[in-house]
Image (spheres, grey):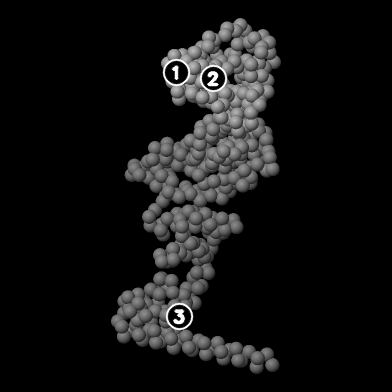
Amino acid sequence: MILNPDRYDSKIVFLSDFYPQWSNIKTLLLLILEIQMTNRSVQSGLALLIESVHKEKGIPKERLVGVLEDAMCKAAKQWLRQKRGMSALEGDQHDIEARYNSDRGEVEIFEFKKIVDTVENKHLEVSLDEAKGHDETFEIGDSMGVKLEVMGLGRISAQTARQHILQKIRDLEREMIHNEFKDREGEIISGIVRRFEKGNIIVDLGKTEATLDYKQQVRSETYRSGDAIEAYVLEVTNSQPPVKLSRNKEEFLIKLFEREVPEIYEGLVTIRACARAAGSRSKIAVESHDESIDPVGACVGLRGSRVQAVVAELRGEAIDIIPFSEDPTRYVIEAIAPATVAKFILENETKKIELIVPDEQLSKAIGRHGQNVRLATKLTGWNIDIKALSRYEAKMKHLYELFSTIPSLSEENIDILLRTGYENLVDIVDLEPDQLMILLEVSEEEAVQILADTDQRIIEILQEERRLKEDIPEEAE
């Protein structure tokens, strides 16, 4: 139960008549609170200012009121502790409650004391007789509240409240900004370049600032203060600035296509994989979930309008758009574009594929500093080896001649061995007879004979090499 004395009346004036230089809403709020806690005859305009801060910062009014009430409680406890000569521990035992009175536009403070038979601490307890002098319904164990005059708390307590409010409003602003931008993680956001700090770009997002870290930038891109910029929201943290941006992530490229290609946004076309060398070249593999939609054509757009919009945002970065395929051979050959492929050798167990390209296509297939083959490898997940056609043919000719020295191997057998990737005699002799039977479709007797002939040929080659080594010193003499 609370004893609430009659409220005093105060003259209502406009704060700007006295302090025209105070225009910041937060500063006004603090100033008004300090005036309310000192002996100046000015009624607080807290209601108006709470509404203003709410609109400007987006902080809920009830949370602003909570900050004010909490600050006044702390200030009142400090004032009572000093007035009564109590220690900090004793002062914290005061039961103080602050309530915002929206009708009067001020924060009212009440001190509660426990009603007891025998008072041991007059600062924390009150006798039943004294309590009944105010209200006959009081009983032992109840709490009696007495309103404190806020205007008597003084400037020191006002400074305590000021510091608390400043910190809490900062915390609330950060929390509101964090919550707002946390929902935008994984999206593209626009801002203005404001300044540069140790290689990082500080971007103004309106309500807060964001950091485009040096490691998240594209090295070929340069900016000046005042430039408009778009980036991918990588992360939102509680640090300052809270928003971390990126322009070199693959996710940024994917989001740009989602924005430019309605079929991707609507889920009719999916980007199955993406590989990017930011600022230079990227590859994306796309798949359609509607047979009537060409996924590559949808991404390119009429006369290249859609892909060019993405390229423009990435400042000229080349983009290869290829159709995704469950067939690894077809997928890899598409991924190596713009080069063409003459032959291929596939090893499913090791996810390795050897691509044979025309000599004039070799540099295009590999790319500058190996970039094209690296991107294709990352896009497909296959280990890709590129070889020139002339070198491949020379190698195949040598292997054919070598395998032809095995008398039990037919031309058909040799073709199968070459086609399945066998490149030396040791790989053949390591096979078991039943494995060779399946591979070459021969009988067990034929398989055993082939292995015996191959083993004999290996011995002959080793003996020839040994003789050659022994003959070299004699020739030198």
User: 147 or 231: nearer the eye?
Assistant: 147
Checking the image for residue 138, the label placed there is 1
Q: Nearer the viewer, residue 447 or 13?
A: 13
Amino acid beneath label 1: Phe
The answer to whether 344 is drawn above or below residue 127 in the figure is: below
Q: Nearer the viewer, mark 2 or mark 1?
A: 1
Q: Position of residue 78 (x, y in %)?
A: 63, 26
Pick the residue in front: 64 or 465: 64
Q: CA distance from mark 2 to mark 1?
A: 17 Å
Q: Quadrant of residue 154?
A: top right
Give the x, y percent position of residue 226: 65, 31
Q: Tell me the CA gap for discs 1 and 3.
A: 106 Å
Badge 1 marks a residue whose secondary structure is loop
Q: Which residue is mark 2?
A: 110
Instruction: Name the mark on residue 197.
Output: none
Count the numbered circles shown: 3
Viewer-proximal residue among 29 and 9: 9
Q: Residue at x 54, y 19 (%)?
A: 110
Q: Are marks 1 and 3 in contact (CB under 8 Å)?
A: no
* Residue occupying image coordinates x 54% and y 61%: 362
